[in-house]
Image: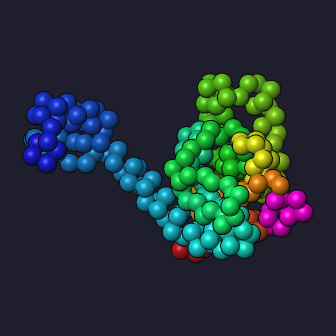
Amino acid sequence: IEHTGLAQSTLYRQLSLLKRWGFVIDDQNEYSPGPMCVPLAWGFDQSSFLIRESHDRLSEIARASGESIGLLIAVKNQAVCLDMIESTHSLRCSFVKGRSLPLAKGASAKTLLAFMNPARRADALERLSAEKLLDQSQRAALEQQLAEIRAQGYATSDSEVDAGIWGVSAPVFQRPGDSAAAVITLMAPSSRVDGRAQFLIDMTVRGASHISARLQSL
């Protein structure tokens, strides 16, 4: 009570909710972290680990390409940005760290889905359908695209999420043969991609491979 400044009744009500959700356990009126804190802490540590081991490479790609590049992970049916290195051009793409988008459109979302565990991918697609972000024909078309993305090893998109924005995304693997731990996505104004698309694709794919090798060597 002294540390929180909350009334006793309010504090006990909050503790009751935390106990119900598994974030707090009560042992003879002594409170300690509950079992749900373990996956929460693991998720934080995993995200921090991915950022730490990929940031330098992302910075190198941003400098070499002159474009913005981000690190994204899948959380339920959302693509969430963990890290972002912005282009130095006055006209540039910006994707704020912590921002999330549905796993339905764009290179990042499709790459995350394509290299996801099949059961988890099916669940994510069901969620998107339930939220009416995909109808039956759109889901069938997306599943075909995902198979093609798995075959080529990366995805590109143009104006799918934001008009005039081109992107290429490649998966990062923490363990060989496992689902992608994350993706890196390079973003650029479509007007600056003409004649450079393959160069940007190759750079992004090589960058993702480099980060994967680094993660797997640790």
Magenta span includes 19:
no
Q: Farthest residue toward the front? A: 90
Position in image of residue 183 (x %, y %): 65, 57
Look at the magenta stretch and give its main secondary structure.
helix
25 sits left or right of 166 in the view: left
Height in image: 205 above or below 132?
A: below
Report the span colored magenta: 192-202
Residue drawn at (17%, 31%) of the image: 10
32 sits left or right of 217 in the view: left
Q: Along the line of sight, which residue is nearer the eye, 40 or 84?
A: 84
95 sits left or right of 139 in the view: left
Height in image: 79 above or below 169?
A: above
Q: Quadrant of residue 85?
A: bottom right
Q: Along the line of sight, which residue is nearer the eye, 214 or 60?
A: 60
Quarter of the figure that contains the N terminus: top left
189 sits left or right of 131 in the view: right
Position in image of residue 43 (x %, y %): 45, 53
Q: Looking at the image, can residue 190 be seen?
A: yes
Height in image: 195 above or below 8?
A: below
Residue drawn at (90%, 63%) of the image: 195
Residue drawn at (10%, 34%) of the image: 8
Position in image of residue 81 (x %, y %): 57, 52
Colour convention: rainbow
Q: Looking at the image, can residue 175 be seen?
A: no
Q: Along the line of sight, which residue is nearer the eye, 120 or 44?
A: 44
